[in-house]
Image (tube, grey):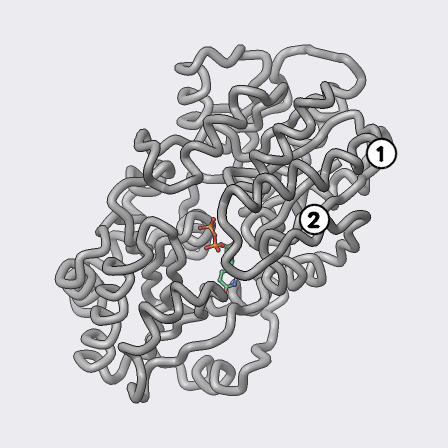
Amino acid sequence: MTVYGTRPEAIKVAPVIKAIEASDVLDSITVVTGQHREMLDQVNEIFEIAPDHDLDIFEHGASLSTIVARVLERLDPVLEAEKPAAVIVQGDTSTSTAAALAAFHRGIPVVHVEAGLRSGNILSPFPEEANRKITSQIAALHLAPTATSRANLQRESVADNDIVVTGNTVIDALLMTVEKKTPFTDPLLEDLADSGSRILLVTTHRRENWGGAMEGVGRALARLAKAFPDVQVVLPAHRNPVVREAVLPHLVGLDNVTVTEPLAYGEFTRLLSLATVVLTDSGGVQEEAPSLGKPVLVMRENTERPEAVDAGTVKLIGTDEERIVAEVTTLLTDRAAYEAMAQAANPYGDGAAAGRIVLRIERLVSGDSADDQDGLAV
Ligand code: UDP
């Protein structure tokens, strides 16, 4: 049983669900919590996944505790009725940790996809760093995307046999999707693609950036749009009104800024493939962009994804307005600086993570605890 509730989880579990559907050993049960609504449904449609159960917990402005309480309360009867052999959760959302806890309470093994990411700061990202640590305490199987995440788990005394390095499933999802070159539904984006203009692609949503930091992002974007009239700034705006109210007022009346609704995954991957520079606070986007050779500036103070920073394709720049303007300006004006970051190498995966994951889950549910021969060689 795979339980998921937000857009990034849906994208990252979709390849796993597809691989379970193709398995001779496993049957797939899918449960969505509805922590996100439209953004989640969009991803299910693209990957042609019709969830078996929908806990429908979404409510505008729901607190983290309400989300967790609802998942616990509404998932439990589904677990009781379906009696899954294992429950798969992904990443670090409130959905994933609450679902892991619900399964743990019923003695069902928890399989954690994208295990072992650590920023080292319990308050950033919030609440994700705490969520992922809690899930690591109760998971039976830890599917680490990279050797770094495996080392984090080993440091916390997780047994070697319970960890497999699989690569990140987001690269599976990206490669399954980007080659389709999905047409844009918004004609403005199709025109922009035809124009061949340089594109600064921006996404922002992190809870710890809400408020002052996000206002600064809005002001920085406005300054950049004015300084580079030949560059098109594109911001698929997250549905959360807190994000929109902080950023969008700064962008009113700027001709070379396009604010869109959240893009369906296929459209987003196409936009990513057309972008010149990516400015984001997203986890998934910083994992995807290096596969397409796009430099990524990350608007955060720390990261649980140091691999691409070490590889030189991602740079952590924080949320200071001056710094954002300066770093984007460098990439738009200094060819050598740009070329140095624009390498199509990806430390997060090779697009074959889901197959490794399903192989290991097949062994878990058959009671075979052999060591991690199926993992990536690292
Ligand atoms: N994404 C999308 N449409 C958009 C913006 C992002 O499909 O308009 C995808 C993106 O490709 C990535 C994921 O959503 O796979 C990232 O989600 P988000 O930034 O919301 O969450 P995070 O990865 O930070 O947890």
In the rendered image, residue 313, in percent from the top left (x then y), is placed at 31, 49
Q: Separation of disc 2 and disc 1 at Cα? A: 14 Å
**Location of residue 224 by image quarter:** bottom left
Helix, strand or loop under label 1: helix
Residue 173 visible to the viewer:
no
Left or right for 123, reference 265: left
Residue drawn at point x = 22 percent, y = 71 percent: 219
**Location of residue 247 by image quarter:** bottom left
**Location of residue 85 by image quarter:** top right
Helix, strand or loop under label 2: strand
Residue drawn at point x = 62 percent, y = 49 percent: 5
Circles 2 and 1 in contact, beta carbons < 8 Å: no
Amino acid type, label 2: Val
In the rendered image, residue 375, in percent from the top left (x then y), is placed at 58, 24
Q: How crowded is mark 1: few (under 14 residues within 10 Å), some or many (20 or more)?
A: few
Q: In this view, does 254 lie above or below 162?
A: below
Q: Is mark 2 within 8 Å of ligand 1?
A: no
Instruction: Tell me which numbered mark, 2 or 1, is placed earlier along the sequence.
Output: 2
Amino acid type, label 1: Glu
In the rendered image, residue 128, in percent from the top left (x then y), is placed at 44, 39
User: Which residue in the protein does label 1 denote?
Assistant: 82
Please give the label number shown on residue 90.
none
Left or right for 78, reference 369: right
Residue 294 visible to the viewer:
yes
User: Which residue in the protein does label 2 denote?
Assistant: 32
Front residue of this view, candidates 232 and 373: 232
